[in-house]
Image (cartoon, rainbow, N blue to C red):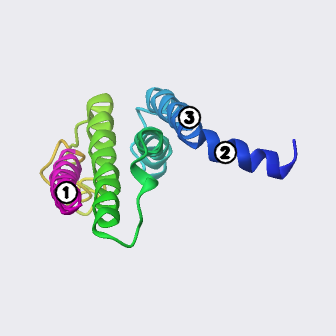
Amino acid sequence: MRLVELMDFLKDNLGKVLIALGIVFFLSGILLLSTFYFELSALGVAVTTVPMFLGVVFIVYGFFVQVGLFSGRWRSINGLGTILLCISVAFFALAITAIQVQLVTGFEIEDVPSRGGGRSSFSMLFPNSTRPFLSLFGLGLEWGVTFFVAGMIIKAVSFLRH
């Protein structure tokens, strides 16, 4: 297949391609999460959460392309509303990923004294918390709702002006 044919195919089917790619990313993130649920390192968390985050974002953006949300002009109030809605999707994906990791891992953090009598370096990563991803869920949900409401208000104002 030539590059021109590939570009024409992507222009016609971008929404479907993004949805399919998002499903693949999300399912691979779920499979990696169930495989590496015991790993509590930065690499283990990143390997499991990045595909899930990208999966949710690609699925929603693919749906946005399918319904024609990106068909408006970007340098307008309508375009600003679209950008805010896209930002809200990223925050909602962050919240979904954080709560999914929290539910599957379910680890508990213990204070383990070190040889010098202080605390271990591990316990200092999440002090006094047995649910380190719960605050990330709350942050993603709050900011997602804020950007979503702002985007919908701006979209409504743009619609009423025309």
Residue furthest right as drawn: 2
Question: Would you name the residue on which mark 3 appears?
Answer: 16
Q: Which residues are magenta?
A: 134-162
- Between 64 and 141, the residue placed more toward the observer is 64
* Residue at x-position 72% and y-position 47%: 8
Query: What element does badge 2 sit on?
Result: helix
The nearer-to-camera label among 1 and 3 is 3
Q: Residue at x 26, y 45 (%)?
A: 95
Mark 3 or mark 2, which is nearer the start of the sequence? 2
Tell me the number on the disc at residue 71. Answer: none
Q: Give whichever of discs 2 and 1 has the lower sequence position.
A: 2
In the rendered view, does 114 fall on the left or right side of 3?
left
Residue type of the residue flagged with mark 3: Lys
Name the one closer to the observer, 36 or 50. 50
Rendered residue at 80%/45% (across/down):
5
Residue wearing tag 1:
143
Looking at the picture, does residue 14 appear above or below residue 73? above
Give the residue number, with chain letter if any, for mark 2: 10
Q: Would residue 83 be found to the left or right of residue 8 on screen?
A: left
Residue 152 among magenta residues: yes
- Local packing at callout 1 (Cα closer than 10 Å; few below 14, some 14-19, many 20+) is some
SS at circle 1: helix
Residue 154 in magenta stretch: yes
